[in-house]
């Protein structure tokens, strides 16, 4: 009987010819240039910026989070590429845990206690992921509890739960400018993003630069527009240092362990692993190197170690980025030396306080316009996971009930929520946790069509 990995590889198409294979040698200069291209295409700065905005971090805290996220991404890339999975792969912060992070932070009282609960839950979850990789039971857990219909539903509700936040808080409620300016800035940045993605699709290979730089260009255009409106403030950039130390555990932050927060993060990690497995197969297809279950288990270990490093640096869970598979396909260069350069660039950028301050200075509405598009894309990714699933009556309920539950909890009046017992507040205060549990339970309890 074929393993899960072999079956998935059996459906893959022949990859494009590579000019430089994974173990091929390439000069330091070329590695640095090609590595920088991967860094630019990954948009690693977006996730920490969104988190800082969603939970209301101060400018210095926001800059520190961005720095630690870059360093975590760099170290994680080196760990996964050179020591664990040994594939040309770059790691970066995931969008999937965003809703859970915001819910854990709020339910734990916010401030230092809220962030320490987020980091504590991430730390325990990362250790569990490493254990799952070593024991080799990851595939069994995902197959049993998170099949495509459940995994796709959870990814769908992640985007759905964040979309109201993107529009209501980051655009309509942004305090950087007036509501008219905020709406206009959001529309400009979103339109620029869509335009460059369309150009990339129209010109295909020649227009690849439009697609891989679309988010960066959209943010630049949004900032230029904000400058014309007089709402762009770069004073923090001028005062920031070129090089500064990242956050240090137990000096700048600590860890606290809340049972509900840990359960939430464990569920998120399982969904994250189910999603990133698709990225691994995309990369293996591009480099024409089939994966085995052993490769996947080593990848799970690498993912766990990467997330452990991230939480140890005061950052959020990281995962493999599928963007890099497209860049490898375009350039034909799959050398792991390039991804060593990617890791180096990330660490270098992470030590620059001025770069972090620059990113933190982007107007809220500009990032909100891009974030709204990102939320929609996350939801569509969930639908793509489910595309090969036959949707019967059972599947309809597995999708519909979590979707309704997500919207109900996003819109629940805060005054009513605060009248409920603490544990119920936490459960209902996290739309992703409640809806994920609903999807898992419905999949197990509802009878399948005969």
Image (tube, rainbow, N blue to C red):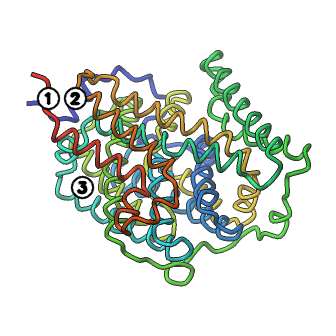
Residue under pointer 1: 448
Quadrant in which the N terminus appears: top left
Label 2 Cα neighbours within 10 Å, binned few <14 / some 14-19 / many ≥20: some
In the image, 52: left or right of 434? right
The residue labelled by disc 2 is: 394
Q: Position of residue 206 (x, y in %)?
A: 65, 20
Q: Are marks 2 and 1 in contact (CB under 8 Å)?
A: yes
The image quadrant where one finds the C terminus is top left
Report the Cα–Cα distance between label 1 and label 3. 31 Å
Sooner in the amino-acid sequence: mark 1 or mark 3: 3
Q: Note whether 25 is above or below 398 in the view shown.
A: below
Q: Is residue 3 left or right of residue 331?
A: left
Q: Give the image quarter of residue 189.
A: top right
Question: Compared to 359, does 187 lie above or below?
Answer: above
Q: Which quadrant holds residue 22? A: top left
- Please name the residue shown 49% across and 83% down the image: 250
Picture residue at 42% right of the left edge, 44% below the top: 406
**Which residue is under mark 3?**
133
Q: Earlier in the sequence, mark 2 or mark 1?
A: 2
How crowded pointer 3 is (Cα within 10 Å; few <14, some 14-19, many 20+) is rated as many
Numbered disc in front, either 1 or 3: 1
User: Quick one: which residue is furthest to the bottom in this view?
Assistant: 251
Viewer-closest of 402 and 353: 402
Which residue is at 71% across, 70% downward?
243
Callout 1 secondary element = loop
Q: Do the CB atoms of the residues marked 2 and 3 lie less than 8 Å apart?
A: no
Secondary structure type for disc 2? helix
What whole-number distance in Å separates the C-alpha atoms at marks 2 and 3? 31 Å
| Cβ atoms under marks 1 and 3 closer than 8 Å | no
* Secondary element at tag 3: helix
Residue sitting at x 91%, y 49%: 230
Whichever of callouts 2 and 3 sits on the residue coming sooner in the sequence is: 3
């Amino acid at each position: 009987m074929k393993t899960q990995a072999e079956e998935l590889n059996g459906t893959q198409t022949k990859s494009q010819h590579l000019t430089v294979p994974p173990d091929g040698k390439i000069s330091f200069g070329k590695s640095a240039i090609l590595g920088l291209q991967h860094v630019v295409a990954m948009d690693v700065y977006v996730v920490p910026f969104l988190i800082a905005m969603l939970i209301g971090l101060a400018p210095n805290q926001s800059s520190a989070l961005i720095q630690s996220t870059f360093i975590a991404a760099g170290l994680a890339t080196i760990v996964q590429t050179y020591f664990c999975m040994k594939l040309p792969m770059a790691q970066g912060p995931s969008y999937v845990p965003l809703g859970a992070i915001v819910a854990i932070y709020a339910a734990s009282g916010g401030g230092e206690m809220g962030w320490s609960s987020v980091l504590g839950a991430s730390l325990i979850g990362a250790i569990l992921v490493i254990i799952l990789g070593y024991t080799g039971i990851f595939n069994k857990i995902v197959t049993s509890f998170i099949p495509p219909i459940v995994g796709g539903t959870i990814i769908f509700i992640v985007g759905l739960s964040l979309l109201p936040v993107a529009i209501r808080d980051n655009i309509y409620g942004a305090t950087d400018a007036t509501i008219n300016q905020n709406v206009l800035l959001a529309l400009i940045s979103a339109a620029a993003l869509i335009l460059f993605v369309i150009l990339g699709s129209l010109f295909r290979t020649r227009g690849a630069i439009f697609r891989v730089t679309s988010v960066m260009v959209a943010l630049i255009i949004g900032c230029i527009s904000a400058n014309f409106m007089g709402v762009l403030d770069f004073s923090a950039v001028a005062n920031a240092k070129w090089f500064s130390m990242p956050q240090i555990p137990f000096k700048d932050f600590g860890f606290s362990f809340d049972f509900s927060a840990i359960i939430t993060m464990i569920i998120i990690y399982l969904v994250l692993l189910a999603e990133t497995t698709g990225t691994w197969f995309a990369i293996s297809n591009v480099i024409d190197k089939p994966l085995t279950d052993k490769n996947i288990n080593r990848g799970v270990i690498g993912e766990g170690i990467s997330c452990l490093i991230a939480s140890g640096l005061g950052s959020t869970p990281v995962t493999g980025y599928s963007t890099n598979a497209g860049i490898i396909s375009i350039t034909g260069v799959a050398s792991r030396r390039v991804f060593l350069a990617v890791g180096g660039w990330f660490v270098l950028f992470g030590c620059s306080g001025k770069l972090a301050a620059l990113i933190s200075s982007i107007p809220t509405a500009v990032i909100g316009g891009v974030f709204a598009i990102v939320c929609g894309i996350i939801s569509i990714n969930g639908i793509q996971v489910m595309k090969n699933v036959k949707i019967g009556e059972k599947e309809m309920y597995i999708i519909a009930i979590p979707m309704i539950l997500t919207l109900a909890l996003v819109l629940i009046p805060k005054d009513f929520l605060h009248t409920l017992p603490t544990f119920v507040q936490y459960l209902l205060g996290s739309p992703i946790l409640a809806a994920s549990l609903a999807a898992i339970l419905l999949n197990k309890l509802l009878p399948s069509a005969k």
